Image (cartoon, grey):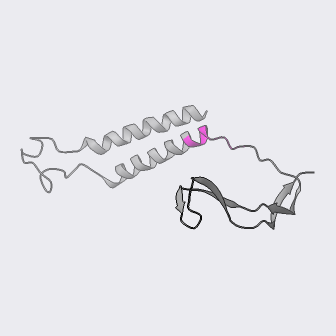
Amino acid sequence: MKKLLSFIIFVLCVSLSTTVYDGGYHPGYYGGHGGCGSHGWDDGYNGWEVAAAILGTAIVLNAITQACYTPAPVVVATGHWETQQIWVPETSQRYWVNQYYDAIRNVWVLGHWEERPGTPGYWTQRQVWVAP
C-alpha cells in the first residue's frame, strides 16, 4: 500500500514540477523579445506550482524515509550502579642516558637506561554497572 501511495505521489510531483517549467520563455512566443520582465518570463512560475512541487517532494521523501526506517528494539537493562575502589599503580619514566666521561672517577660511563620516578600509586573510585 505504501509503495502504491509513494508511486502516486511521485507521479504527481513529476507532473507538477513539469508545469513549473511549462510556461517559460519560448523564442518568438512573446514577439521575439528575450530576457526577463514584460516580454520573457511573464507566465513561467506561479507560486502554487512551485509550492506544490516542493510539498510533493517533501511528502515523497517522508514516505520513503518511513518505509525504510525500522526502529531498534528497546532493551531495558536491569541492575544497579556501584562505587568501587580501585588502585592505580605508580608510574615511572624510562629514558636513555648517552655515554659520557666522568672526570671525578676518570672513566667513561657507557650509555644505559635509567628510570625516573613519576606519580605515586593511589586509590580512586569509579562507578560500575552491576547486573543481577
Q: Residue at x 6, y 44 (%)?
A: 32
Quick one: 88 or 9, which is closer to the camera?
88
Residue at the right extreme of this rendering: 132
102 vs 67: above or below: below
Q: Give how far across and how far down residue 58 sits, in percent.
A: 48, 47
Q: Give how far across and how far down residue 113 sits, in percent.
A: 62, 54
Magenta stretch bounds? 65-72
Question: Which quarter of the rendered picture does the N terminus lie within?
Answer: top right
3 vs 100: above or below: above
Q: Residue at x 78, y 60 (%)?
A: 89
Quick one: 43 or 129, which is closer to the camera?
129
Q: Residue at x 22, y 50 (%)?
A: 43
Q: Give how far across and how far down residue 91 sits, in percent.
A: 71, 61
In which quadrant of the rendered view does residue 95 lie? bottom right
Q: Give how far across and how far down residue 84 sits, in percent.
A: 86, 62
Q: Is residue 70 magenta?
A: yes
In which quadrant of the rendered view does residue 85 lie? bottom right
In which quadrant of the rendered view does residue 73 lie? top right
Q: Is residue 63 magenta?
A: no
Q: Residue at x 35, y 50 (%)?
A: 50
**Side of 39 relative to 50 (left or right):** left
